[in-house]
Amino acid sequence: MTRILVAWALAAMSTFAMAQPQALNVIVFPGGFNLPTWAAERQGFFQSNGVRVVLTLTPSSTFQMQGLAEGRFDIAMTALDNVIAYQEGQGEAKIPDNPDMFAFMGSDNGFLSVMGGKGVQRFADLKGKKLSVDALTTGFAFVLRELLAKNGIAESDVSFERAGGVVERFQELMKGTHAATVLLTPFDLLAQAKGHVQLARADEQLGAYLGIVGAARRSWARQHEQALVGFIRAYRDGVAFLYENREIAEALLVANVRAMTPVLAKQSLGILLGDKTGFYKDVRLDAQGAQTVLALRSKYTGRPLGDPAKYVDASYRDKALAR
């Protein structure tokens, strides 16, 4: 009888363990572009797909990519340019040798704008001024440099300073520390509400651009395929939920973004859920957008890069969407 009870207890414990969702340590930048994650969490999509997301907010891309490469985080929602840079040994943070990071899904085009600081009304006002970036050679620094060039500002006309992630850059812009920076929606709208001028939108001047992606290490992904597929499926379902439930999407923005108002939330969704500008409903790794990222990195580093397949693998996304 005792043996039967022990066997039953072990079986029950095994079943319970199998039923527990896989914890995923995910590192993200703070901001409204986390809407799909918030929606998936609210609706229980992660849980129903066998995963539990533990979010960490990163202060910078260097902290984020170093943590991903070292295995402290399983997944990073980050710029595709960061993945490429660190794979090519061009990142600013020290990481282990032979990194195996890759992008497994796409989220959006980055929602990028160049925002002017206090008193800046046009690009010409930036001459002789200091501009902020997350890091000098990764993230969206090359987007800023390209938009400056397209609008008649030579790199010798300005100086660049590292200021950390989008929240930190936004705060410094509000203080008047820098004359301009790249901000992501909704921080661009928050800045405009405080009287700052939007000098350019990246999607209007650069065309297709693959901004934020889901990234992981290939070795980790192979060992945790089911959990990764579940994460992608839940994220995709979160995106779909947002498009179908805009009032809840507005409420999520107001609840999770400091200084967000219902009016600004509605304006933000015009971009975040816009027909041409919004989150990718199919979480695709946009090929044309990836080529733009590679072209900019090639241009500003002087090192030709041309094969997106070296940095992306859509097979996990394909499995997630095959259900």
Image: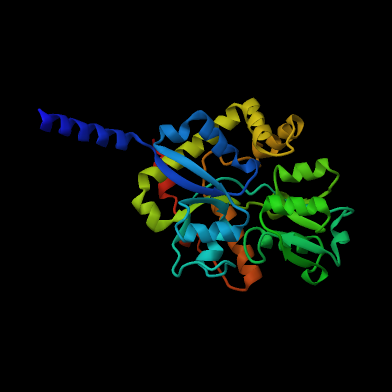
Where 145 sits versus 267, above or below? below
Q: Residue at x 62, y 73 (%)?
A: 302
Picture quadrant where residue 47 is located: top left
Where 248 sits versus 98, above or below? above
Query: Which of 41 and 228 lies nearest the eye of the viewer?
Result: 41
Picture quadrant where residue 267 is located: top right
Query: Which of 22 and 125 lies nearest the eye of the viewer?
Result: 22
Residue furthest front as drawn:
2
Say left or right for 267 vs 50: right
Q: Residue at x 36, y 47 (%)?
A: 225
Residue 237 in the image, given as x and y percentages of width and height: 50, 34
Query: Which of 103 and 22 lies nearest the eye of the viewer?
Result: 22
Can residue 312 be seen in this snapshot?
Answer: no
Residue 99 in the image, given as x and y percentages of width and height: 45, 65
Classify the position of the C terminus by image quarter.
top left
Q: Residue at x 59, y 53 (%)?
A: 289
Say left or right for 201 vs 242: right
Residue 279 in the image, given as x and y percentages of width and height: 60, 41
Residue 61 in the image, given as x and y percentages of width and height: 60, 58
Classify the position of the N terminus by image quarter.
top left
Can residue 6 be seen in this snapshot?
Answer: yes
